[in-house]
Image: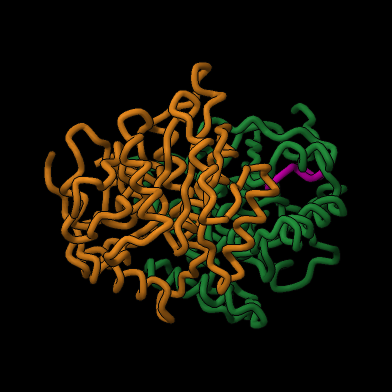
Chain colours: A orange, B green
Amino acid sequence: MSLFKVVSSKLAAEIDQELMGPQVGFTLQQLMELAGFSVAQAVCREFPLDKANINKHIFVIAGPGNNGGDGLVCARHLKLFGYNPIVYYPKRSEKNEFYKQLVNQLGFFKVPVLSQDAANTDWIEYLQPEKTLCIVDAIFGFSFKQPLRDPFKGILQQLHELENKVPIVSVDVPSGWDVDEGPTTENCINPSVLVSLTVPKPCSNFLKQGSSHYVGGRFIPREFANKYGFDPFNYQSTDQILKL
Amino acid sequence: MSLFKVVSSKLAAEIDQELMGPQVGFTLQQLMELAGFSVAQAVCREFPLDKANINKHIFVIAGPGNNGGDGLVCARHLKLFGYNPIVYYPKRSEKNEFYKQLVNQLGFFKVPVLSQDAANTDWIEYLQPEKTLCIVDAIFGFSFKQPLRDPFKGILQQLHELENKVPIVSVDVPSGWDVDEGPTTENCINPSVLVSLTVPKPCSNFLKQGSSHYVGGRFIPREFANKYGFDPFNYQSTDQILKL
């Protein structure tokens, strides 16, 4: 697989900070809406709705931070596109009111959000391969640092065991991977689809053969990209994703 | 032109209030991002970028309220799609910090925002028909009430005089029209394109022959639409607009 221009976890954090800083003035809510939408568009491109899959579920697992928020937004758009998402959001941020609102919005769209009880293992019952179109891994993003802890350690172990039966779509970074170094153990998940946000991170070079790699999160101008050492991506028309 | 299901200005206000109320929990920032994106997508559908028009401008006029905010978001997405928007935003809300951020974001994208001096008539200099692909009228939305006051009275008079030379794309409601009754004077603008948000308002039945009517703002589930007496629109794939 060819190599694409990437930015390190450190630069990705700087980009994020500058986008939401006083000069540019993007809000988290805006960027999350666009990022989540772009992931949903990538899912739609990879797994188009048809008669054979219209009754299947998309299983979205949301982590405690912004990556999880992208997943919550993605699930809402998937529902609007005609899919049947189910959300598992085991560890919820109590600090940020906006995350609660994202969960409320899912309720408004009648998207099931499983109980947040981390000791609960019922979630895996909902993840039956023959009934699941794909898994959206929105657990950790570019600010993830080792070590992996429960409940996500256990969840990712189970996803790894399922990954040959149900394709995994990872948001920005395959969860559990080192952002810069890639997979760190043999038990890491191997996503079939990666949607890098803004610009790929170094770990994207370790995607397995035959996987699909998209860039999404279309919200920066050329000069800004160049300043961080990459070229803007050649998105087509109004697309919010580009297949690399 | 055929009639579509519409909701009155009163119902439109109720829908808006419920979407942003405690139960549903959408934020203004989310809805504005999606609404502005959908208007930009409609512009792109109606006026595809090609060699002949790539250097033309799109002149976005933003009003003081939420319709104007949709216009500011739209301008940013148009820039990302490769167009050259120019924004005229003569009467700015000082109350809401978010509107200032939307203007900052336009600065980040190097989208010109003309001086806000309402007595300034220079703005019309930027609106040369041979150099302008279209005008985006984001002045007033469904909460507009007569009478029309300056500077917008004068601006709309000038747009009316130009409308046979430069097509007008109105956001949600053609500015100056009564939301329920349609055009009230002979001097009203006649847009070539209307992008109704969420659901058309009664005035959309008075669009001139041959105009294009889109619905955008794809953010409500079926049950919610039905509760307000209309059917959800049959958006295709990940489209944020549907041509009616």
B32 is higher (above) or lower (below) than B95: above
In this view, which residue lies farthest toward the top? A51
The magenta-colored residue range is B196-204
Tell me residue B240's x, y (percent). Answer: 56, 42
Q: In which quarter of the image is the N terminus of chain B?
A: top right
Give the number of callouts. 0
Using the image as rendered, state which of residue B63 and residue A6 is in the foreground.
Answer: A6
A221 is higher (above) or lower (below) than A57: below
Using the image as rendered, state which of residue A97 and residue B186 is in the foreground.
Answer: A97
Tell me residue A216's x, y (percent). Answer: 36, 50
Using the image as rendered, state which of residue A52 and residue A199 is in the foreground.
Answer: A52
Q: Residue at x 27, y 37 (%)?
A: A212
State whether residue B166 appears in this view. Answer: no
Q: Residue at x 54, y 46 (%)?
A: A87
To which quarter of the image does residue A6 belong?
Answer: bottom left
- In this image, B25 relative to A5: left or right? right
In this view, which residue lies farthest toward the left? A2
Q: Which residue is drawn at 67% across and 64% down?
A: B66
